Amino acid sequence: MSTIKLTYFDVDGGRAEPTRIALSIGGIEFEDHRISFSEFRQMRSSTPFNALPAIEMNDGVYTQSNAMNRFFGKQAGLYPEDPWQAFLCDEVMDAIEDLMHFLVRTFGMRGDELKAAREKLVDGAFTTYLRTLNARLEAAGGEYFADGRLTVADLKVFVWIRGLDSGVLDYVPTDLASRVAPLLVQHMERVAADPGVVAYYEGRGK
Amino acid sequence: MSTIKLTYFDVDGGRAEPTRIALSIGGIEFEDHRISFSEFRQMRSSTPFNALPAIEMNDGVYTQSNAMNRFFGKQAGLYPEDPWQAFLCDEVMDAIEDLMHFLVRTFGMRGDELKAAREKLVDGAFTTYLRTLNARLEAAGGEYFADGRLTVADLKVFVWIRGLDSGVLDYVPTDLASRVAPLLVQHMERVAADPGVVAYYEGRGK
């Protein structure tokens, strides 16, 4: 395996964060290349699909965060070998990716337009997805989304719920997850306390 | 495996079509449940994530087309076992899912608003994605996207390019793919001629 360089925005969240954690848990060395939004505007046309996160590996540059989560998840012991459990893991990861798409549409909006769009998201897709994810977790036993252990699906949901709770998204109430999907808040705390996750953030100095 | 019932709109395209083909190639029996848009409006709130395609299997109802493609792709011999080839397959499938998200945003628009949105898509994301997919196919040897053989990534791109070429999307020139990504048009013809794909459409009476 050649050197790995993961490029994304300088936030401990969003689409690259589960991959960063999975790489760390797997003991896979990588350059955590963090860029500003203005840097992205300058380099955007040179990334495949004009997308971030982008990853350099195997002498190429690739994209798609869930493809990365699956690839490194296999190396890090964070992806189910059983096909059915892998399906459950995949469904959850792709559902969060839907939410990212819905959210990104509101970036760049301002004022009343942003407020209306975010409130529609909160009452609509966010609530619907939180409820289904809560039910999925319950059906899987309440602790982890697949395979009865930590997988990349857990990392993906953890990062999402932590983001919702953080207040970083204007017009998204920080108590939304705890009102609509209380199991997901417990799950967030469970994942945050995972030794591999703790070690990653200690390594980041946080 | 319990009975499988795949619910989607009554079109030979979109998000469910690669899964239908993969199920057919794998010889996996399923009910091809096709519904109208008004039927979807009535049943929407009862599907997980309010999403289609939805699939009944293993005593539950699940969503996420690429999760289905991967699950049935494994059973049908249409998904790479090698993790790196699986990554290449996954990246392509998720890129097409991005395109679906961009396209779905224009559904429900009319007149000048639709025209402007579609033209922006054609000059922007559609062209960018077609170019990157064309380059990906070339890098993989020019015939298939991963593993040197037909995989669910090929089915996903095939359905997308066939849709672009069909003229079903207003304000999307039917020669877009042939101008921007000629390898993808050849690829579409290659996949259309695959015996498993031919057999699926013959079974559909088409």
Image: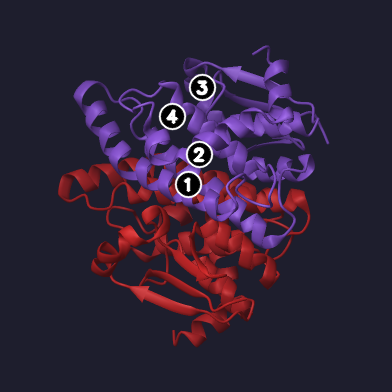
Chain colours: A red, B purple
Q: Is residue A3 left or right of residue A106?
A: right
Q: Quadrant of the C terminus of chain B?
A: top right
Residue A128 place in picture, x, y as percent: 48, 41
Is A74 displayed left or right of A92 in the figure?
A: right
Inter-mark Cα distance, 3 to 2: 32 Å
Residue placed under numbered mark 4 in the picture: B164
Q: Earlier in the sequence, mark 4 or mark 1?
A: 1
Task: Identify the element where label 1 is drawn.
Answer: helix
Crowding at dot 1, Cα within 10 Å, few <14 / some 14-19 / many 20+, comes out as many
Mark 2 highlights which residue? B184
Circle 3 is placed at which residue position? B40
Give the mark nearer the N terminus: 1 vs 3: 3
State which chain disc 1 sits on.
Answer: B
Which residue is more in the foreground, A175 or B77?
B77
Which residue type carries mark 3? Phe
Q: Position of residue B107 (x, y in %)?
A: 36, 27
Give the residue displayed 41% in from the left and 72% down from the top. A12
Q: Are marks 2 and 1 in contact (CB under 8 Å)?
A: yes
User: Which residue lies under the disc numbered 1?
Assistant: B134
Q: Can residue B51 be seen at all in this image of the molecule?
A: no
Query: What is the x, y in percent for residue B61?
Result: 66, 35
Q: Nearer the viewer, mark 3 or mark 2?
A: 2
- Quadrant for residue B114, please give it: top left
Amino acid at circle 2? Leu
- CA gap between label 4 and label 3 equals 24 Å
